[in-house]
Image: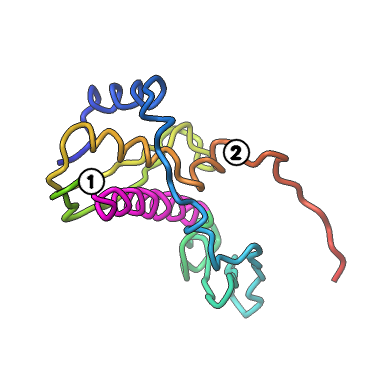
Amino acid sequence: MILANAALRQSLFALSRSSPVRSRLIIPFRGLAKGSPTQVAAEETREANAGYGIQIVSGRHTLYSDLMPEAGGNDKGPSPKEYALVALSSCTLMTVRMYSDSMIKSGKWPGKSIEKLSVSCSEHGDDQHVPLNIQVELKLRSNLDEEQIKRLVAAAEKCPVKRMMKGGVKNGITTVLVKD
């Protein structure tokens, strides 16, 4: 089942805004943050012809980011905007999976299961730097009923990365210069 039908999306959006179901959702967000680094560092790769290559260190993981050759990079990794979409899609999937697992394991959804779950994000608009809209699409193969699916969609709205992107950082984002 694909939750891409416009009428269904609108009704689920209305439900998530007006339904008492919204206030009953309990998502164990702290589980997503346990063990996550609170700081991530990015450093230029200053090799010959490095373009805009960046090495990113996050805890015990090393990642790379770059731009496509058309933008002066060497395409050695996803662009920062691609990482933002990756963060949104992976966080949404983890949030929905954690919620569904908790409902199934607790016995609140007896005999129910999710065979397959995937999330994709796409940006829309004319501005190449900041999209007018980002659409998150859930794809689901399960034996859940319509009410349970609505609850999963409402859980997806609770994704911490989505909340950050929508302005949920209480005191904003500040940039400070630190001398090396």
User: At label 1, which amino acid type do we have?
Assistant: Lys
Residue 152 percent coordinates (x, y):
30, 40
Question: In the orientation shown, which residue stands out farthest toward the right?
Answer: 179
Image quadrant for the C terminus?
bottom right
Image quadrant for the N terminus?
top left
Dominant SS in magenta: helix
Q: Regarding mark 2 in the picture, which secondary structure is present there?
A: loop
Name the residue located 23 percent from the left edge and 26 percent from the top edge.
8
Tell me how the rendering is colored.
rainbow
Quarter of the rendering containing residue 150: top left
Residue receiving disc 1:
139
Q: Name the N-terminal-most of marks 1 and 2.
A: 1
The residue segment tinted magenta is 81-107
Residue receiving disc 2:
168
Name the residue located 55 percent from the left edge and 68 percent from the top edge.
35
In the image, residue 59 sits, relative to residue 156, either above or below, namely below
Name the residue located 45 percent from the left edge and 45 percent from the top edge.
159
In the image, residue 98 sits, relative to residue 159, either above or below, namely below
Residue 110 relative to residue 17: left or right: left
Residue 120 percent coordinates (x, y):
32, 48
Q: Nearer the viewer, residue 66 or 153?
A: 153
Residue 5 percent coordinates (x, y):
21, 29
Tell me the CA gap for discs 1 and 2: 26 Å
Magenta span contains residue 83:
yes
